[in-house]
Image (cartoon, grey):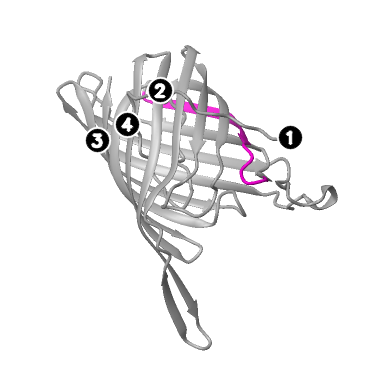
Amino acid sequence: MKRHLSLRIIPVCVLVLAFWGHARESVLPVRAPQSYALFGGIAELRDDVYSADLNVAGEYAPCHCFSVYGDFGYRLVSYQWETHLHDQIHEALNLKVNGLNESYLGMKMAPLSFAGVDVNWKLPPREGSQVNRFYRLGFSPFGLYDFSKNMTLGAAVEYFTYFEERRFQQGDELGAKASISWKPLWVRADNSGWMFDYVFLYRWRIQESENLKMDEGYRKMDDLYRGFKMRVDGARYFSVYKKSLGVAFFYEISRGHLFGMETGHALGLYTKLIIP
């Protein structure tokens, strides 16, 4: 059965440009709705492909129970470097992908201080990537627990469904995410100090994709996969006109297959303004 969805309303009050290109999404800690703006850059190595991206991010929360956000990435350059040690062949190939990667729009609703749901919509990449060119709708119920005054634990479950594109139906996916946010030596009076985040994400495809151009018995693509990502952020925030302005560094490792998460590493540096 074909699944179609038209996006008629796009929140104009938010721009968020996220962390990756090559059709790869951000791994962010589980957090309640908040207002912030982010700008940064990323260097990534994924299966012999070296890339550099710019990212800008933002979320707007009129209250602590609701927010809207967007997430977009821009790929500057992407090179594939292949090495054959035995016959000493080294080859660099410019993949000529330059432009927007995947884009995300969404909203968070948290009717309770410790629980809520994140609903998001993924748009296919433009010239910044040649993979994962599908529209995707996602639902992610999440929970938060204040383990201590300066430490918050988060957990979320995820469900993603894709929409048919050019007679190809990508399979639905499930995921689970856990995160820890720690603020050692945080000065609450002026919202400054250190912040460390750790995120673990595990995702798997629960049904095979289908090529609807084929006869009924030959449509299955045999593309089930399971993969994980882990990310660590370290940031130093300073008080600027009662707001928190931080400079952060992160490292991420991922391992997966096919349309899902690919083996790779990423390093990033960004600045983030949090509006209490």
Q: From which residue to which does the magenta span run?
A: 150-167
User: Which residue: 74% across, 53% down?
Assistant: 222
Name the side, left or right, on which 61 lies relative to 49. left
**Image location of residue 111, percent across then percent down:** 49, 11
Quarter holding residue 3: top right
**Image location of residue 6, percent across then percent down:** 54, 29
Q: Amino acid at mark 1?
A: Met
Q: Amino acid at mark 4?
A: Pro
Q: CA distance from mark 1 to mark 3?
A: 47 Å
Secondary structure of the residue carrying tag 2 is strand
Residue 235 visible to the viewer: yes
Marks 1 and 3, the one that precedes in the sequence:
1
Name the residue beneath numbered marker 2. Answer: 68
Residue 271: assigned label: none
Name the residue beneath numbered marker 4. Answer: 184
User: Which residue: 18% across, 27% down?
Assistant: 239
Name the residue beneath numbered marker 3. Answer: 246
> Do callouts 1 and 3 mark residues in contact (Cβ within 8 Å)?
no
Residue 28 visible to the viewer: no
User: Which residue: 48% across, 74% down?
Assistant: 82
**Dot 2: within a 10 Å radius of its alpha carbon, few (fewer than 14), some, or many (20 or more) residues?**
many
| Label 4 vs label 2, nearer the camera | 2
Q: Amino acid at mark 3?
A: Gly
Secondary structure of the residue carrying tag 1 is loop
User: Which residue: 54% across, 47% down?
Assistant: 133
